[in-house]
Image: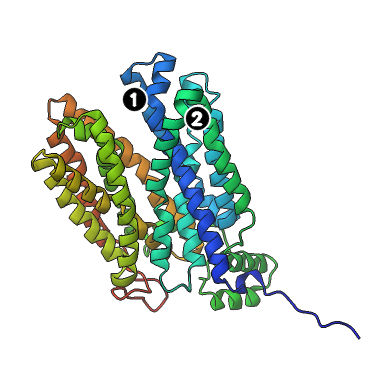
């Protein structure tokens, strides 16, 4: 007698267990932590690198600008990676990109090589896009998926703190080059762990629909697409123009502007936080570092809070409210008294409402685009972040060069554009799955 045989379910019909979700979440969390670690390490060590190469402060700032341009260019390809090669492979590639960026930075011989090498950190900076798309599809049936994603997205403050902490430990003994090389090792381990993750059922179905259509199995492909809520255009790879169709154009533009404006605020209050605290509030540099540590700890809580709230009142509403409140808080921080207690409380609240909504934003973007352009749409909006960083830095420099004080310059470049980022989100689409959102009959929200 022959033994009974069991057939494995197709990848698109695979049941995602709690154990699988835990493993996927853990790998994505550490992938983001060490991507942020690499991304922020360069900014942390730039003064040391500049001193080693004999660069002036202005020249080092110029190098940072060109690095940001390189990051932007590399980030453009991530959407294509997601939609053409899959969520799992895109995750592996972006983490490996961050590892290459870290390892090769230790071999940089000058300005040109450093700019070219650090451009690869664009893969690490875009790893959050991969997480947003991949986890959105893996968490499809989870009850508190927004909160679950917020825990992963909270890897940003964790990565920033790890970079600062390990730099303090390693730099005095090994120097800046080996500090980067050491940063490469955990990223490699995470990439290896990612090879054991499953592909998302949604992308597996998308890939099978394309295969069947190419094989001429049109009816079978249409049936499978209908079963998984995929549209009739899912048989071809996405293009940038696909996210600027009449149904998606306003949504894509509003998201892109939100990223642009909000990253101008991030450049002021997060990246250049020590400058704001020392020049606008009169703190010493050492005291400003202490404030940054405390504020990032509060910022971590901001991710969890906004992810939790997004599950209850809607992610779009959470983002809009968070950034508008944050604009008011940052203005109060700048215009209020310079006392230590007041500044610590208001600056911590500023990061809480500035960075916390990203826990809802990244997941919202994955929900708001159809499956066939989910990676492309999310990435097109996301790449405007580095552009906003460049614009924020440039505007702040222009205002300061014109004699404007840091307090006023930060208010204009940071608080004003943070407010605008919340307001332009009013033009973004509503998505299904939360109380304040309405789904149109064709499956695309109005």
- Colour setting: rainbow
Mark earlier in primary sequence (1, 2): 1
Image point (28%, 47%), residue name: 262
Q: Residue at x 44, y 15 (%)?
A: 53
Q: Residue furthest right?
A: 1
392, 146: nearer the viewer: 146
Q: Which residue is mark 1?
A: 61
Which label is found at residue 148? none
Picture coordinates of residue 198 (x, y %)?
61, 62
> Tag 2, which secondary structure?
helix
348 shown above or below 131:
above
Query: In front here: 400 or 381?
Result: 400
Q: Is residue 30 visible?
A: yes
In the image, which is nearer the foreground, mark 1 or mark 2? 2
Which quarter of the image is occupied by the C terminus? bottom left
Q: Quadrant of residue 222?
A: bottom right
Q: Position of residue 437 (x, y in %)?
A: 31, 73
Q: Which residue is rendered at x = 41% and y = 58% of the image?
A: 151
* Residue on which disc 2 sits: 179
Whether residue 345 is situated above or below residue 105 in the rendered picture: below
């Amino acid at each position: 007698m022959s033994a009974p045989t069991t057939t494995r379910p197709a990848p698109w019909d695979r049941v995602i267990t709690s154990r699988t979700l835990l493993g996927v979440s853990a790998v994505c969390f550490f992938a983001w932590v060490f991507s942020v670690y690499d991304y922020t390490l360069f900014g942390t060590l730039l003064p040391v690198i500049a001193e080693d190469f004999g660069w002036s402060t202005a020249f080092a700032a110029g190098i940072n600008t060109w690095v940001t341009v390189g990051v932007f260019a590399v980030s453009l390809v991530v959407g294509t990676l997601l939609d053409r090669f899959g969520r799992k492979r895109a995750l592996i590639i972006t983490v490996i990109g961050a590892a290459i960026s870290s390892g090769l930075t230790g071999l940089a011989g000058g300005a040109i090589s450093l700019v070219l090498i650090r451009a690869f950190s664009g893969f690490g900076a875009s790893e959050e896009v991969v997480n947003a798309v991949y986890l959105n599809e893996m968490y499809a049936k989870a009850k508190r998926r927004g909160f679950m994603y917020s825990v992963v997205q909270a890897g940003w403050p964790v990565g920033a703190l790890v970079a600062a902490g390990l730099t303090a430990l390693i730099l005095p003994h090994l120097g800046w080059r080996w500090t980067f090389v050491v940063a490469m090792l955990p990223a490699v381990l995470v990439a290896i762990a990612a090879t054991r993750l499953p592909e998302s059922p949604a992308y597996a179905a998308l890939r099978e629909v394309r295969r069947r259509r190419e094989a001429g199995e049109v009816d079978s492909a249409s049936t499978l697409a209908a079963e998984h809520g995929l549209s009739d255009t899912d048989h071809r790879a996405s293009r940038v123009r696909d996210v600027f169709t009449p149904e998606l154009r306003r949504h894509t533009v509003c998201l892109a502007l939100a990223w642009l404006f909000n990253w101008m605020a991030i450049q002021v209050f997060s990246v250049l936080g020590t400058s704001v605290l020392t020049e606008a509030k009169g703190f010493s540099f050492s005291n400003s570092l202490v404030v940054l540590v405390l504020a990032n700890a509060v910022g971590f809580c901001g991710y969890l809070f906004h992810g939790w709230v997004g599950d209850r009142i809607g992610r779009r509403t959470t983002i809009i409210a968070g950034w508008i409140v944050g604009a008011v808080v940052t203005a109060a921080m700048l215009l209020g008294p310079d006392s230590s207690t007041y500044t610590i409380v208001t600056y911590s609240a500023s990061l809480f409402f500035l960075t916390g909504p990203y826990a809802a934003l990244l997941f919202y973007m994955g929900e708001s685009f159809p499956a066939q352009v989910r990676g492309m749409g999310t990435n097109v909006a996301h790449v405007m972040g580095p552009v906003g960083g460049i614009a924020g830095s440039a505007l702040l420099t222009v205002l300061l060069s014109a004699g404007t004080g840091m307090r006023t310059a930060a208010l204009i470049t940071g608080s004003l554009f943070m407010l605008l980022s919340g307001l332009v989100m009013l033009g973004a689409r509503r998505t299904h799955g939360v109380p304040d959102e309405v789904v149109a009959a064709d499956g695309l929200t109005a």
